[in-house]
Amino acid sequence: MKLGAVIITMGTRPDDLNALIDSVRKQDGDSVGIVVVGNGAPVTGVPDFVRTVDLPENLGIPGGRNVGIEAFGPGGSDVDVLLFLDDDGLLPRTDTAELCRQAFEADRKLGIISFRIADPDTGVTQRRHVPRLRAADPMRSSHVTTFLGGANAVRTKVFAEVGGLPDEFFYAHEETDLAWRALDAGWGIDYRADMVLNHPTTSPARHATYHRMVARNRVWLARRNLPAPLVPVYVGVWLLLTLARRPSGAALKAWFGGFKEGWTTPAGPRRPMKWRTVWRLTRLGRPPVI
């Protein structure tokens, strides 16, 4: 089983990037091919064995990762599995690639694996990094309904069947969009606590456009993927949750701007999931209304 790794960078963390590349290079078993995509910035100072793609502009996270996928052939078809890793992350164990191979070989319907993200200094996994509602125990592996964008492995047959990440999202919720399409096609998603990416503890709100993107993409996610009766329910629940979290005035203004944008701008192709997929998500512990 051939593995590749896609890393996107904006050129701001060269030391972290090279440490990550080194950790991928040290994985047990057959070597993992590496492609680094410069998302609006040239890739410099990486080892010769790394393939690079320089994009003249920042295409966003999903756009950059889609370019990385295609660098491994149409839909990533030159390899069986692609790892997607944040450029300031690090694989602390050398058996992660082998664990991926074993997991995908053991379950032919396993489409995506979400790694556990841990702070390199404290070992703590933030609750938001456990992709399920019952997130109190990050050391428990389980079947899940979404995955972490910068710490995962995807079988390339998933891309061939359901397509890549939604370029237009730019940032936020692109993983759930792909996850829902994969689940609707019959693929499974696992969260594996034993597959670890070290990553510094950060707040997603550090991105200037975080609140607008989150709100807009929530609406787009529903409009693209949910049966019509569930669209207002899903969006309404997230509106109430957002208000309950009592964001600042500036954050709330940005959020409502994105919320409006989600309804008034094209969301991309609409492919509502089957009702049996809704039931499957419900049985997995996360009905698509939250």
Image (cartoon, helix red, strand yellow):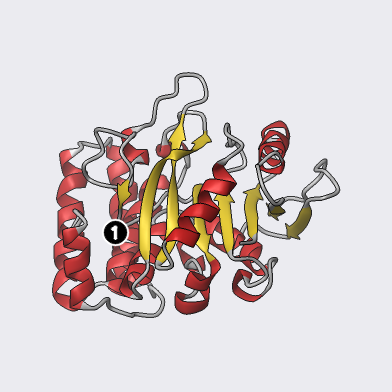
Q: Choose between 275 and 213: the one closer to the eye.
A: 275
Q: Amino acid at mark 1?
A: Phe
Q: Choose between 207 and 73: the one closer to the eye.
A: 73
Looking at the picture, how far across and down is residue 202, in whole percent? 45, 31
Q: Choose between 79 and 217: the one closer to the eye.
A: 79
Residue at the location (66% across, 42% down)?
27
Give above or below for 26 relative to 4. Answer: above
Looking at the picture, how far across and down is residue 53, in whole percent? 75, 59
Looking at the picture, how far across and down is residue 142, in whole percent? 30, 48
Instruction: Determine whether the residue tagged by mark 1 lies in a helix, strand or loop.
Output: helix
Residue at the location (40% across, 44% down)?
192
Looking at the picture, how far across and down is residue 103, in whole percent? 46, 54
Asked if one can make out residue 288 in the rendered structure from this viewpoint, the answer is: no
In screen coordinates, is 130 left or right of 50? left
In screen coordinates, is 148 left or right of 134? right
Q: Choose between 82 and 166: the one closer to the eye.
A: 82
Residue at the location (52% across, 47% down)?
99
In screen coordinates, is 138 left or right of 70? left
Tally the numbered discs.
Answer: 1
- The residue under label 1 is 259
Mark 1, other Cα within 10 Å: few <14 / some 14–19 / many ≥20: many
- Picture quadrant where residue 72 is located: bottom right
Q: In the rendered view of the protein, which quadrant contains the C terminus?
A: bottom left
Q: In the rendered view of the protein, which quadrant contains the N terminus?
A: bottom right
Q: Residue furthest top?
A: 122
Asked if one can make out residue 11 in the rendered structure from this viewpoint, the answer is: yes
